[in-house]
Image (cartoon, rainbow, N blue to C red):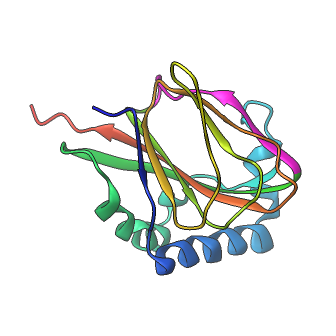
Amino acid sequence: MDKLIIQNQVSDKLVNDFLFVLEIYQQMKPELNQALNDSICSENAYQTPNILEFDLFQKVSLPLLEYIPYDMNLDLFHIHLIEYFNGGLQRGHDHKKTEDFSFILYLNDSDDGHSCFLKKNTIKIKPTKGKIIFFQSDIWHWGEHTSGNKKVAVGALKKINNG
């Protein structure tokens, strides 16, 4: 199984819906910025809590299910949205203790702030609106510094045991 799966075009509607949700959080709930927590890997950013905790945002997220590339039963249980400001970045980390697969969906284009994945070599991916990257949770990854306003949706998938 490929450790990185890149799809180049998520629908504009889904991307725009996520951008709208991010804007709602930033305007209505600035105090919920998860990036202010030292245990969060986002720096100089606004990061929402898990948007799937609200029925309305679960419905907004449903179209994402059609893009999941894995042929197994998976639960999409977490999505948070992040806007990075000038100098913002994502510190290196993995998700092997919390999920089986992860994804990053770019909500806008950015000339910098590449996502980096450490396999045998470092793989750098330029943020392009609508591009989504699925990867196994044990891959070490980070986001380089951005000059401002890089926006992403980040999510988590777990295998569902049918036994």
Task: Evaluate whether residue 10 shows in this view.
Answer: yes
Image side of residue 101 versus residue 131, left or right: left
**Which quadrant holds the C terminus?**
top left
Residue at left 34%, top 60%?
A: 67
* Residue 127: % across, % down: 64, 56
150 to 160, vertically: above or below: below
* Residue 30: % across, % down: 81, 63
Residue at left 29%, top 64%?
A: 66
Closer to the camera in the image, 107 or 157: 107
**Which quadrant holds the N terminus?**
top left
Q: Residue furthest top?
A: 120
In the rendered image, residue 68 lying in the magenta stretch gets the answer: no
Image side of residue 124 versus residue 135, left or right: right
Closer to the camera in the image, 87 or 153: 87
Q: Residue furthest bottom?
A: 13
Image side of residue 8 versus residue 49, left or right: left
Closer to the camera in the image, 49 or 156: 156
Q: How many marks?
A: 0
Residue 123 picture quarter: top right
Q: Residue furthest left?
A: 163
Range drawn in magenta = 87-98
In the rendered image, residue 96 lying in the magenta stretch gets the answer: yes
Residue at left 64%, top 51%?
A: 126
Residue at left 29%, top 50%?
A: 69
2 to 61, vertically: above or below: above
